[in-house]
Amino acid sequence: MSTSRRKFLKSAAAGGLFFIPAIRLFGQELPKLSKQMRFAGIGVGGMGTPTCNDIINAGGTIVALCDVDPGHLQGYANSHPGIPCYTDWRKLFQEKSSEFDAVAISTPDHTHAIIALEAMMRGKHVYVQKPLARTFEECQLLFDMQKKTGVVTQMGNQGHPGVFRYDELLKEKFWGDIVKLEAWSDRPVWPQGMASYPAPQQPPPGLDWDVWCGPSPDHGFSTAYHAFRWRGWWDYGCGAIGDMAVHNADPAFWSFKLGLPVEVRAKCPDPAGIAFPTWSEIELKFGPTPVLPKGVTLTWYDGKHKPKVPEGCNPNFKCGDNGLLVHGSKAVTVGGSHANSPIVCSHGGHPFNDETRDAQRKAREIVRRAKLPSHYREFVEAARDGRAEAPHSRLSYAAPFTQALLLGCIALRYPGEALKFNPETKLFTNKPEANEFLRLRERANWSLAKYRDAVGARR
């Protein structure tokens, strides 16, 4: 047994984990599931309900439910009578781990990582909602843990299959040279810009607030956080870019293989502090990629800010509430939310005319060639067969994608400054103090130390 493997198993034992058969660890082929993929739904209110239902419809079998909010839990449990229910995911793992093969995690952003890390250490396949995690380091730990364990993973950017339409256009060199990328959203649709924490309130009966907070700071229960408004608070969410760029900018990251940026710069009304600002414009500058040898800049807009309408568009053209503009030397396309089908809005730099309409028709013919996989079914079938590389939003893609967006969140703390980032060392080089925001300072009794030890993470 190698030193690293001994260390991993020793750490697992110290953390009170069940023994995991060696075949399920360290990148070795996972055993095929004979009949069904059994999963536990962790977080079943809000997005958790459709997530669990879609996995069931894709062939998964739900065998346990967990939610810190008894109201959410009971609401979903009514549709699945007799299934064991928990309000603490740690107890779920302790008591039922041998009875399920995977977990579907639909909790708030700040608890994605710790639950997913525990699941992977126990050899469970993981479907985790977007954004993958709240901090850069958590994303890295998740990616490293997946490589150690070899489990199947999928991030919940449900529109991801649509990126293959963009791949088809890229094969045809339809855009020409890529000049710039712009993505935007009408989010936030929750409060942002707060300068002080709300006064603590009495939690609803049965709500496990300590488990809700998990590794993040406990500022006391408030309806300003739970059940939906947590997205605007730095300690719990990732703001508008974390919520929607994972959908709207997905084709850009996938098709153009953007990876991590080398520089980020933000504009916003006030620096991010305890909360995200009410609007932002964030530039992410990428160096050369396997597809774009000259690199490219992607600009993100939120809070009702949008890009300018490209020259040569139909006079009636307007940027919608959510979208992605791909500016090429030959053509400009616009796509809606969730990797929606791209449409030519400008062609050749000239005013909108019959040539533009011909380009629109040609683009429609090209994107129809794309074969769009089922986002949920590919996860279920990959888990059944033990094929970790099968899901397209697996962590090898989802982790650096999310990390890039989280660097944009950090730029909001230093508006107007160009923050240089080294993708190799994964550190800011000209603003050392910004590096403290790459990592979570977790609460006592909610430490990520055993997971760092398990993957040999740098401290």
Image: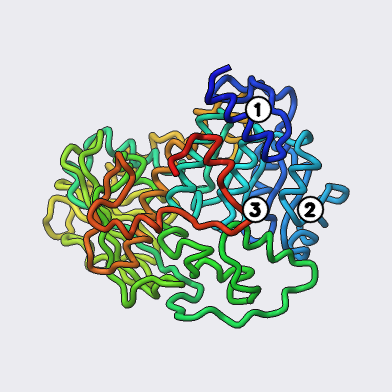
- Label 2 is placed on what type of residue? Tyr
Regarding residue 398, the answer to whether it shows in the image is yes
**Residues at discs 3 and 1 in contact (Cβ within 8 Å):** no
Marks 3/2: CA–CA distance:
19 Å
Marks 3/1: CA–CA distance:
21 Å
Mark 3 or mark 1, earlier in chain: 3
Q: Looking at the image, which residue is at 65% across and 35% down?
A: 12
Indicate whether 213 appears above or below 197. above
**In the image, 437: left or right of 9?**
left
Q: Is 377 in front, or is 284?
A: 284
Q: Looking at the image, which residue is at 28% across and 55% down?
A: 325
Q: Which mark is residue 86?
A: 2
Q: Which mark is residue 114?
A: none
* Residue labelled with disc 3: 50
**In the image, 94: left or right of 358?**
right
x, y percent for residue 204: 75, 73
- Label 1 is placed on what type of residue? Arg
**In the image, 188: left or right of 385?**
left
Circle 3 or circle 2, nearest the eye: 2
Mark 1 lies on a secondary structure that is helix
Marks 2/1: CA–CA distance:
25 Å
Q: Which quadrant, please, contains the N terminus?
A: top right
The local crowd at label 1, few if under 14, some if 14 to 19, many if 20 or more residues have their Cα within 10 Å, is many
Q: Looking at the image, which residue is at 33% across and 36% down?
A: 168
* Residue labelled with disc 1: 384
x, y percent for residue 110: 55, 57
Circle 3 or circle 1, nearest the eye: 1
Mark 2 or mark 1, earlier in chain: 2
The local crowd at label 3, few if under 14, some if 14 to 19, many if 20 or more residues have their Cα within 10 Å, is few
Q: Which quadrant, please, contains the C terminus?
A: top left
